[in-house]
Amino acid sequence: MAKDKENSGSKTAKKPIPSVLSINVCDAIIRDELSKKVSLIGLFSIIRANSFPCTHPLMHVYIALTNGHGKYKTEVRFVGLEESKPIMGMIGELNFQNPLQVIEINLCWQRLNFEKPGDYEVEVLCDGDRVGARKFMVMGPQQQIPPTSGTDMR
């Protein structure tokens, strides 16, 4: 029998990383147990603070992932972009039964500390690979909120 040259090596192919369907930061997450639908309440991308360091009392993060193949060590962490330094995180395991499965993660963060104003992000890693991130800003009282686009219905 002839050996398949591509499969005869000692290297094993790395499994694909999951795909991010969404990463949302909000005030609350409500799941209706009957319909299993999720409501995200008070979505935001800017945190206002009167002084620094500041503490955000309560924040929820909703993450939906798909295209996973088996088990992944998964980390969700807050990162200050200026220093590329994680300020807080959680690690757990996700197990995809098949690649079409959608896994939803609902996390609650209490008393998240921000040392200074700037750009931050919620970063999602699976088996050490970055699969996605959601950027948000922490601003002081005198800073102007940047203009948004795409939300006006005229």
Image: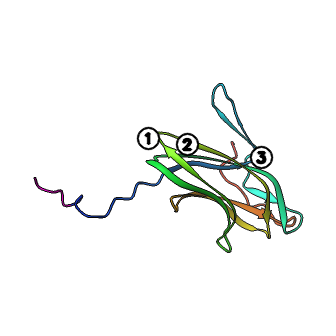
Q: Residue at x 73, y 58 (%)?
A: 147
Does the residue at mark 2 contact the one at mark 1 (Cβ under 8 Å)?
A: no
Please name whichever residue, 126 or 21, is drawn nearer the observer in this view of the structure.
126
Q: Does the stretch in magenta take in 57?
A: no
The residue sitting at 87% across, 67% down in the picture is 142
Secondary structure mainly formed by the magenta segment: loop
Instruction: Tell me residue 42's x, y (percent).
Output: 76, 44
Q: Position of residue 140 (x, y in %)?
A: 84, 66
As helix, strand or loop, the secondary structure at mark 1 comes to loop
Of tags 3 and 1, the one toward the viewer is: 1
Q: Which mark is residue 98?
A: 1
Is 55 above or below relative to 95?
below
Quadrant in which the C terminus appears? top right
Q: Secondary structure at mark 2?
A: strand
Percent x, y for residue 2?
11, 55
Residue 151 placement (x, y as % from top left)? 68, 47
Residue, disc 3: 27
Identify the magenta region.
Answer: 1-5
Q: Earlier in the sequence, mark 2 or mark 1?
A: 1
Quote the CA–CA distance across marks 3 and 2.
Answer: 21 Å
Amino acid type at circle 1 is Asn
Q: Quarter-wise, where is residue 138 in the image?
A: bottom right
Please, what is the three-letter code of the amino acid marked with disc 2? Ile
Look at mark 2 in the image and give the residue it sits on.
103
Total marks drawn?
Answer: 3
Nearest to N terminus: mark 3 or mark 2: 3
- Give the CA distance from mark 2 to mark 1: 11 Å
Q: Residues within 10 Å of mark 1 (few under 14, many from 20)?
A: few
Q: Residue furthest right?
A: 50
Residue type at mark 3 is Asp
Q: Of marks 3 and 1, which one's residue comes earlier in the chain?
A: 3
* Identity of the residue drawn at 19% across and 61% down: 5
